[in-house]
Image (cartoon, helix red, strand yellow):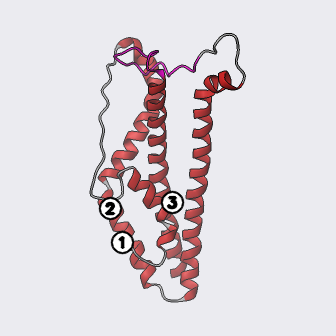
């Protein structure tokens, strides 16, 4: 991606490369998680299923549509390189700046929420260090839908990190794809505004 307005789209490029969804990046990252479901877990699993399915659908749609995303990126490059008048460039810069600002805003809000969520997970441990009690505080429990084939209490910190990484990767997948769609919509709006 090499054109005049490249810096407006750099954040999305980095985000999608880190998720393995950038259409110009040849390596693909995929992982498989095995989990045993039974009738007792059905209600607990349904509580997290919607989010998990949404994350999975977003990731898979980004993976499947990478060629279309590539075509759209090339069209954006072509449009940026073909515009010569200062008024047209001002319009497209303004729209690209709006998309960039929305991307930064969404990433900032999401990062703050995830940080607070992580703080909630580790707050008993932090409080034990800062304000120790005679008895230990009860650690934050993992969601009941997460069942593993080993002792969860022994590996509670590793499981917590696993849960948080899953949350972070899923959330940033959605943010990466959606903000890229915002870029496309803003670019289309700019092109319609120019043709008016």
Name the residue located 34 percent from the left edge and 18 percent from the top edge. Answer: 37
Label number found at residue 182: 3
The quarter of the picture where residue 152 lies is top left
Q: CA distance from mark 2 to mark 1?
A: 10 Å
Q: Main secondary structure of the magenta part?
A: loop
Whether residue 196 is visible to the viewer of this picture, yes or no, is no
Residue 140 point in image, percent of width and height: 57, 21
Q: Secondary structure at mark 1?
A: helix
Look at the picture and state if 129 lies above or below 175.
above
88 vs 194, nearest the viewer: 88
Question: Where does the magenta region start and end?
Answer: 139-156
Name the residue located 58 percent from the left edge and 18 percent from the top edge. Answer: 139
111 vs 91, nearest the viewer: 111
Nearer the N terminus, badge 2 or badge 1?
A: 2
Magenta-colored stretch includes residue 42 = no
Name the residue located 40 percent from the left edge and 36 percent from the top edge. Answer: 53
Label number found at residue 74: 1
Residue 158 point in image, percent of width and height: 44, 27
């Amino acid at each position: 991606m090499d054109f005049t307005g490249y810096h407006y789209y750099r954040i999305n490029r980095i985000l999608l490369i880190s998720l393995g969804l950038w259409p110009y990046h040849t390596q693909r990252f995929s992982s498989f998680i095995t989990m045993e479901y039974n009738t007792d877990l059905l209600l607990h699993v349904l509580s997290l299923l919607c989010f998990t399915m949404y994350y999975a659908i977003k990731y898979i749609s980004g993976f499947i549509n990478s060629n279309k995303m590539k075509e759209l990126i090339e069209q954006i490059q072509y449009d940026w390189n073909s515009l010569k008048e200062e008024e047209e460039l001002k319009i497209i810069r303004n729209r690209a700046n709006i998309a960039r600002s929305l991307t930064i805003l969404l990433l900032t809000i999401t990062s703050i929420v995830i940080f607070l969520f992580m703080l909630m997970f580790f707050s008993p441990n932090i409080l034990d260090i800062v304000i120790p009690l005679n008895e230990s505080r009860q650690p934050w429990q993992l969601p009941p839908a997460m069942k593993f084939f080993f002792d969860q209490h022994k590996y509670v910190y590793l499981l917590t990190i696993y849960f948080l990484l899953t949350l972070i990767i899923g959330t940033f997948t959605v943010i990466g794809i959606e903000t890229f769609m915002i870029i496309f919509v803003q670019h289309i709006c700019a092109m319609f505004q120019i043709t008016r």
